[in-house]
């Protein structure tokens, strides 16, 4: 949504649009604002790891809301608290006079510690807050429903893009191999490997584009100006595939004499290709995570965590996925045939699929944690 449209909605009194404009400034200080509206009264809940400073927060809100000059909002109730706690401070801003009226308690000159509402819809009008005693502290709202929602949306994006890409790849590879076998009756292992690499060079950018587009639809519900995510993701997949390919074959060819040496142990001989692929994958994950980080670094607090989780979570998922494939898929394949080139290709493919889905389960939890403090954006009309 464009800034002009967001400002237009905020001037019309849209609480979510106002919260988004406020968050654009406050999130740089680690503060998240949630908003709701009842009649001409706007309610704002400010949360941070350290309780927001009352004077500084009120001074900023006075300036920002006076500048906004929404004719539909006359009063603003402001609640400030530390994340995970129920108590905090509470103030009232009357926009018509441009003055703050702080709820008074028994101690003169000090703002009492009030219990912030679980949700903004539970806050009481000022007259009730003065006449009735404060409710006992209640448990803070659980973060898990919102995190679970974002996580499920992230998994849906990954599974949908993977399924579509797999269908396209299966049809494409099937037609290519059918044509080749009908012309030449057979194909060498080198020919199969060459066709596989060529096909993956087409499949990976396609997967990156479809995945980036699906993830963009999820991110747009929480972050503005995220359109570059899909293109950066596709570019990251292209560069990552090339890096993995180059690093793998470079290390594999460099260490080939050691692998083929009769005196080399079986474990080392089998482990070197795996290590070469793992190092290539490390560069690939780092490349994809960095280009994605470029699109969210200014909009999402602690966006650098996405790079760390993508790299380390990806490597962990790769190891667990390949181990699971070797544990369950290899016995299944070898029970029907010898462990030849095709069997090895099936085991690697299954391990790659396991790793891919496990990676998105881990990275989805990280993205949900990053997006949790952000308010959901209003839908574009």
Image (spheres, grey):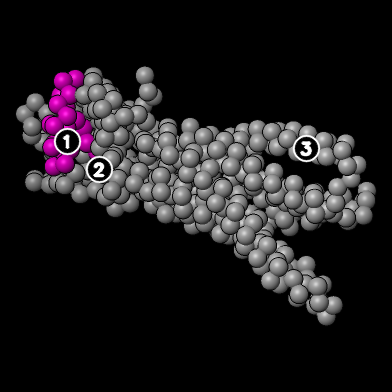
Contact between marks 2 and 1 (CB within 8 A): the answer is yes
Q: Is residue 211 left or right of residue 323?
A: left
Q: Nearer the viewer, residue 91 or 274?
A: 274
Q: Which of marks 1 and 3 is nearer the N terminus?
A: 1
Q: Position of residue 21 (x, y in %)?
A: 26, 35
Q: Which of 36 and 202 is in front in this view?
A: 202
Disc 2 to disc 1, C-alpha distance: 10 Å
Residue in the image at 87% along x and 38% along y: 183
Q: Position of residue 290 (x, y in %)?
A: 46, 53
Disc 3 marks which residue?
A: 176
* Quarter of the view holding residue 271: bottom right
Mark 2 Cα within 10 Å, few/some/many (few <14, many 20+)? Answer: few
Quadrant location of the C terminus in the rendered image = top left
Q: Is mark 2 on a helix, strand or loop?
A: helix
Q: What element carries label 1?
A: helix
Q: Earlier in the sequence, mark 2 or mark 3?
A: 2
- Circle number at residue 64: 1
Residue 300 appears in the picture as rendered: yes
Disc 2 to disc 3, C-alpha distance: 54 Å
Q: Magenta includes 67?
A: yes
Front label number (1 vs 3): 3
Q: Where is residue 191 in the image (x, y as percent from the top left)?
A: 80, 50
Q: In the rendered view, tell whether residue 225 sits above or below residue 345.
A: above
- Circle number at residue 102: none
Q: Position of residue 166 (x, y in %)?
A: 69, 37
Disc 2 marks which residue?
A: 25
Which residues are the magenta region? 58-80
Residue sticking out furthest to the bottom: 263
């Amino acid at each position: 949504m464009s800034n002009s449209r967001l400002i237009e909605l905020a001037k019309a009194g849209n609480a979510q649009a106002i919260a988004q404009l406020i968050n654009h400034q406050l999130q740089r200080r680690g503060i998240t604002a949630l908003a709701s509206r009842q009649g001409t009264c706007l309610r704002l809940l400010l949360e941070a790891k350290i309780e927001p400073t009352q004077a500084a927060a009120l001074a900023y809100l006075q300036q920002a809301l006076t500048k906004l000059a929404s004719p539909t909002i006359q009063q603003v109730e402001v609640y400030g608290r530390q994340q995970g706690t129920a108590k905090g401070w509470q103030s009232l801003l009357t926009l018509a006079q441009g003055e703050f009226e702080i709820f008074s308690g028994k101690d003169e000159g000090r703002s009492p510690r009030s219990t912030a509402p679980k949700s903004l819809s539970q806050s009481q009008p000022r007259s009730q807050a003065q006449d009735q005693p404060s409710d006992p502290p209640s448990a803070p709202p659980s973060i898990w429903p919102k995190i679970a929602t974002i996580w499920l949306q992230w998994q849906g994006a990954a599974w949908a893009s993977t399924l579509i890409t797999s269908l396209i790849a299966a049809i494409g590879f099937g037609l290519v191999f059918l044509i080749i076998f009908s012309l030449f009756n057979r194909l060498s292992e080198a020919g199969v490997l060459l066709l596989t690499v060529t096909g993956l060079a087409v499949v990976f950018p396609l997967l990156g584009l479809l995945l980036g587009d699906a993830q963009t639809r999820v991110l747009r519900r929480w972050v503005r100006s995220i359109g570059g995510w899909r293109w950066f993701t596709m570019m990251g997949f292209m560069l990552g595939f090339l890096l993995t390919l180059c690093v793998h074959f470079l290390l594999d060819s460099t260490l080939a004499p050691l692998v083929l040496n009769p005196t080399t142990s079986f474990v080392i001989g089998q482990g070197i290709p795996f290590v070469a692929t793992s190092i290539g994958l490390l560069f690939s994950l780092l490349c994809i995570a960095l280009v994605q980080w470029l699109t969210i670094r200014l909009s999402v607090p602690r966006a650098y965590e996405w790079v760390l989780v993508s790299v380390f979570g990806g490597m962990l998922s790769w190891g667990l996925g390949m181990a699971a494939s070797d544990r369950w898929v290899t016995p299944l394949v070898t029970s029907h045939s010898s462990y030849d080139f095709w069997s090895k290709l099936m085991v690697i493919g299954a391990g790659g699929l396991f790793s891919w889905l496990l990676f998105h389960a881990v990275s989805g939890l990280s993205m949900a944690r990053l997006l949790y403090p952000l308010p959901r954006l209003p839908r574009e009309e």
